[in-house]
Amino acid sequence: MKITTRWGCLVGMILGVAAANGAAAPRKGVRLENLTWIEAEQVLRPETVVVIPLGAAAKEHGPHLRLNNDWLMAEYLTREVLARADVVVAPTVNYHFYPAFVNYPGSTSLRLETARDLMVDICRSLARHGPRKFYVLNTGVSTVRALIPAEEILAKEGIILRHTDILHVAEAVEKEVLKQEGGTHADEGETSMMLVIAPETVDMSKAVKDFHENKPGPLTRDPNGAGTYSPTGVWGDATLATREKGEKIVRATVEGTLREIEALRAEALPAKP
């Protein structure tokens, strides 16, 4: 028992020194799902910023990335936000509006109205208990078409909803590091990010360049079909992806997201109707 006590004291001293030196900084955010309702009542205040991660768990990303690519990205970015921002994080939403990919097996999409109302109902439910500021940590592009009308509906109820624009949050850095002639899906940029976020899910031996003229409509495997032709589901050049590029893009994405969350925190609450 004396040996155990000595080791316990020694470990406690080491941990104490590490914490004092900033080696074990406390987490700043909290996941709502890990609380009891009594604990939730304490953190769901009018000034609380609630983050809602949004990432598809079943959406094609070419032959080299998995269907749950966006979910993995949302979870990674959520962990970064939890460590650095005073927020309450709601459970990740893994179904939404992804009509451009339904031509590829395994991909799922909700109707725009369903996706819109899903987010409205989540925010309304939580707002009943205090919070009126919500931020969707959004990893999709087409999702914005459903998020904007959701924001408009909630604004009329005195609730602020904002979202990440994944195409622009790290745009300046992407312009510096990306070499592909164009693309936005399972491409050089997204694949580079995944080489940082979840490298074990990336098969670079199957990465391809698949970049055809951007036409109105979804991606299609039919060369004569309506929309942008993409036999692989890639739109861009995934072969150019590197971890080094990904580190820069991921860092810029996290920093941009944190700035947007703090800007939301600073926004004045609208008067309740």
Image (spheres, rainbow, N blue to C red):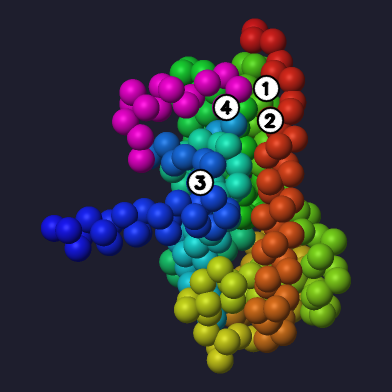
Q: Are marks 4 and 3 in contact (CB under 8 Å)?
A: no
Nearer-N-terminus badge (1/2): 1
Whether residue 224 is visible here, answered yes or no, is no
Report if residue 37 lies within the magenta region.
yes
Amino acid type, mark 2: Arg
| Image: magenta residue range | 34-48
Q: Which residue is mark 1?
A: 155
Taking depth in this image into account, of 21 and 75 the one nearest to the observer is 21
Q: Could you say whether the residue bearing mark 1 is in a helix, strand or loop?
A: helix
Query: Above or below — where is 258 with respect to 134?
Result: below
Q: Position of residue 271 (x, y in %)?
A: 69, 10
Q: Which residue is mark 3?
A: 27
Check disc 4 and report the residue beneath it: 48
On the rendered image, what quadrant is the N terminus found in? bottom left
Residue lying furthest top: 273
* Placement of 118 over or under 219, stated as above or below: above
Mark 4 to mark 1 CA distance (whole Å): 17 Å
Amino acid type of the residue that numbered disc 3 sits on in the rendered structure: Arg
